[in-house]
Amino acid sequence: MRDYAKELPEHGEKFIGENDLFLEIFHRYHGSQQPGRPPLLFVHGAFTGSWMWSKYIPHFMAAGWDSYCINLRGHYKSRSVDFTQLTFEDYLEDIREAIAEVVDDSGGPPVVIGFSMGGILSQKLAESVEIAGLVLIDSSICRQVHDEVPYQGLAPQAPGLVVPAPARGEQFSADETCEDIAFQRKYLSMESGKAFGAFSFHFGAKGVSVDGARIACPSLVISAVGNDDDDRRGRAAARHIGGEYLGLPGTTHTGLLVGQRYREAVSRIMDWLARLQDCSLPGATRPNGLNGA
């Protein structure tokens, strides 16, 4: 099995805050220096950790972006905690702490890139915390988007105290090889039932309300599209926060990060970041699609 986390370039590591959150710091490659670029903060989803960004990070380093990957409390190499007690609000506090650390280290607010559970956490935080931009990759949806495009045929289950790691017993998916899945299987871990109970409609949650009008930063929403409802849901999520939208038919939730077509998402994010940087220059105006809500 190819372990992409062990192939990451040399980088910095530190533990932050009273919960010893593990933060990985990847500086842009020498020679790719670009003035005026905000740093990037990557926020993982449920069951995972910073390792889930292993395919992405080298691309952003090579393109001249400083990247920070946080691990929420209890995840990957962050200090072990009691998952039965962790809440959605605890994870929000972890991201606040990571943003503060990035600002102290780099001198400015980051663009936050959130996947899945990390996406709904990042949306909620963007209501009240200054960030330079927001990228959501197949994010868990907020209550307002679910009201507009609800999931059909759900048989919600109570999450219990903890949610076991996905078994990933399949050998491949539409956009993942057996090696891609084996990589995830090696690292996947349990998740907080209380957190799932707050945001996951699959576990009977009422959902997290997000006030899109309070998210003032530019944003981009990327969705894995398996059917028309996936596309409608992604478009609704982008409208709700005033962002751009990219739907990728034939991709899967985890495949967007570690599958065979992950470069399509990376390429769109790179393009969006380049335009974000251009419109931040003196005298520039934001082009269509980079307007905050």
Image (cartoon, helix red, strand yellow):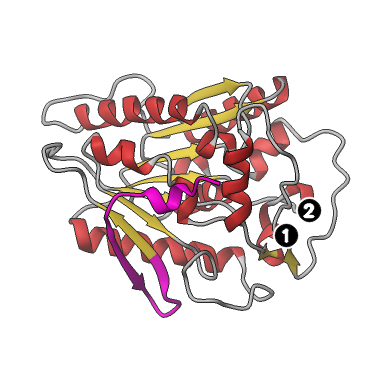
Q: Nearer the viewer, residue 135 or 253?
A: 253
Query: In the image shown, does 14 or 288 lie closer to the viewer?
Result: 14
Horizontal and vertical percent position of residue 129? 38, 55
Specify the amino acid type for callout 2: Phe
Boundaries of the magenta span: 1-22
Kindly give the residue lying farthest to the front in the view shown. Answer: 1
Q: What is the C-alpha distance between the residues marked 1 and 2?
A: 6 Å
Helix, strand or loop for disc 2: helix
The answer to whether 127 appears left or right of 157 in the picture is left
Residue position marked by numbered label 1 in the rendering: 197
- Residue 79 colored in magenta in the image: no
The amino acid on which the numbered mark 1 sits, given as a three-letter code, is Gly
Tag 1 secondary structure: helix
Q: Tell me where residue 248 sits by quadrant.
A: top right
- Compare residues 2 and 230 and report the one nearer the observer: 2
Q: Nearer the viewer, residue 103 or 4?
A: 4
